[in-house]
Image (spheres, rainbow, N blue to C red):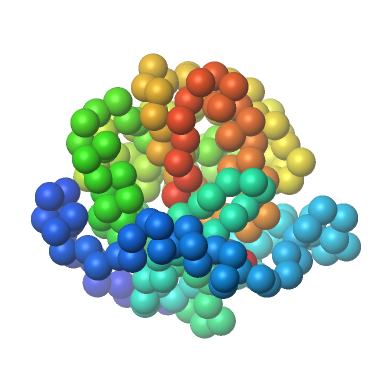
Amino acid sequence: MLFDPVIEQCPSMSESLESIQQAPLSDILRSIDEGYAGKDLFAEGGPRKAWHAEHADVLARCDLSEQHVHMFPKVGLRVIAVWKRTVKGPTLADIKASDEMVPLFANALAPVIGSVLGANLRAGGFALVTTPRRRHKQRNFACMVSEALAERLGIPFREDVAIARTKQRIGVDFEPGSIPPERNLIVFDDFVTTGSTLGAMNRLLSPLGKNCIYFVGVDNQ
């Protein structure tokens, strides 16, 4: 094992909301224009876009030692992430392969989501969904985290909302699967690089009248 994270039991949602120290959402939104000026190496037409997108999990790393909760623009969406990629630490592929990472991700994301949505979440009408199973259909890391995260938030996890007919990650559109009855959907993905997957989820769900908010574990940019 390349890493041995300390995993704590997730407190109740009320305790999480009381203890979390996060900047107000208005401050986060305001910081987007001020702090996000980096060049997008995966911009449309970039010569290395496809290769990097296909191998991002192998190349990128995140040590998960310090949370860096932030919001950033991606494919026209506002996405909230808990961590950013790092130079050292386990690769994203290693993280996906470790069962120990499932509660770590769920415990980190639950209070962040609770803080952002607050009383709206407690009022009901929310469900948690994730991106389609493509390469890992049996042991799917995003689905495992989603199930644990939904349990901590006290909301249902709706599986197989979107269906991908191919394994490609960029320039893809999804087909509807088991569309949930809830109107408000928390869309979770474990990692985001180009944002193509989240964009495809938005193109599927928004025309169906769903209100979506997007959260990821690691911002791989």
Does residue 122 appear in the picture of this structure? yes
The reply, left or right, for residue 173 in relation to residue 191 is right
Quarter placement of the C terminus: bottom right
Q: Horizontally, is 120 left or right of 55 in the view?
A: left
Q: Is residue 129 visible?
A: no
Q: Residue at x 24, y 72 (%)?
A: 6
**In the picture, which quadrant includes the N terminus?**
bottom left
- Which image quarter: residue 50? bottom right
Q: Residue at x 72, y 37 (%)?
A: 172
Q: Position of residue 19 (x, y in %)?
A: 16, 64
Q: Does residue 77 lie above or below 28 as drawn?
A: above
Q: Would residue 155 be found to the left or right of residue 133 on screen?
A: left
What residue do we see at 30% from left, 25% from top?
125
Q: Picture quarter containing residue 112? A: bottom left
Asked whether 206 or 138 is in front, the reply is 206
Q: How many marks?
A: 0
Residue 160 in the figure: left or right of residue 104: right
- Residue 138 pos. (x, y %): 47, 38
Give the residue drawn at x 51%, y 52%: 79
Residue 22 image offset from top left, x and y in percent: 30, 65
The foreground one among 79 and 55 is 79
Rendering coords of residue 185 (x, y %): 41, 32
In the rendered view, would you say 205 is above or below 120? above
